[in-house]
Image: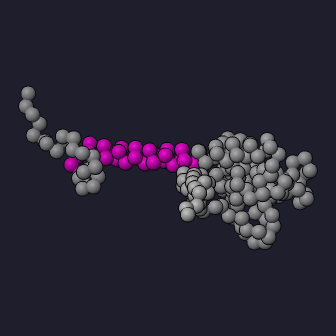
Amino acid sequence: AQRSKRPHLASPPLIVIIVKKRTCCCNCKMVASRLIAALATVLAIADAATVRTEVVRKLVAAKSLAASGLPDPTCATGVISLKEGEGPQACCAGYCGECSDYPTCATVRGQNSTFACCKTQVLSMACGSGAPANVCLKSCKESVPPCILETGEVFTTPAPETRTAGTDCNEAVKEWRQKADVAMTPPSA
């Protein structure tokens, strides 16, 4: 049995193939393209998991608010539409992903979500604008998403880098303990 005289068919690191654009044979090209496809799939799955986590968080918060009978005046548990013109903004359900008239807004998660995710339809269902009273959408000051935000005020999502209790919890505890120690320490004479 003779050894192959084609050492380029040995398995070099795949990253070298991609970085140096080495095209030694069809097999290497195929392996490199499969690696790129697998990497793209992993990145897409990671991104989808992040989005899914945010949707679940908003869903749980919305159910909690609805169960307690509290409204959501700033659309914290939903998705805010962009401000256009003088009319009000829509606050779509948290599972929508975005609040606009995108092509699949009527069938999010395989269900009829026309009046929960499509901005124009959500706004058209506002109470007092011709929608039947049993299905009309109230103001966000009175209900949870989907709802209509107040006219005349521009609502935006908070900046991700904004300081919140969740982001600085350990710092707040440390600061509170320092203040408690100072308060409990008798003044030195």
Q: From the top left corner, tell me how far across and down residue 67 is, in percent.
A: 79, 41
How many marks on residues?
Answer: 0
**Residue pictured at 45% horizontal, 48% vertical:** 43
Residue furthest front as drawn? 189
Q: Is residue 2 left or right of residue 21?
A: left
Q: Is residue 121 visible?
A: no
**Residue pictured at 30% horizontal, 43% vertical:** 31
Magenta stretch in the rendered image: 23-51
Q: Is residue 157 above or below residue 108?
A: below
Residue furthest top as drawn? 1
Q: From the top left corner, tell me how far across and down residue 64 is, in percent.
A: 74, 43
Q: Is residue 45 magenta?
A: yes
The quarter of the picture where the C terminus appears is bottom right
Corner quadrant of residue 162: bottom right
- The residue nearer to you, when weighing 25 against 50, is 50
Q: Is residue 39 left or right of residue 130?
A: left
Q: From the top left corner, tell me how far across and down residue 1 is, in percent.
A: 8, 27
Residue furthest left as drawn? 2
**Residue pictured at 49% horizontal, 44% vertical:** 45
Q: Is residue 105 magenta?
A: no
Colouring of the image: one colour
- The residue nearer to you, when weighing 86 against 124, is 86
- The residue nearer to you, when weighing 98 against 30, is 98
Q: From the top left corner, tell me how far across and down residue 22 is, in percent.
A: 23, 53
Magenta span: chief secondary structure: helix
**Residue pictured at 54% horizontal, 53% vertical:** 174
Corner quadrant of residue 159: bottom right
Q: Is residue 73 visible?
A: yes
- The residue nearer to you, when weighing 106 against 59, is 59
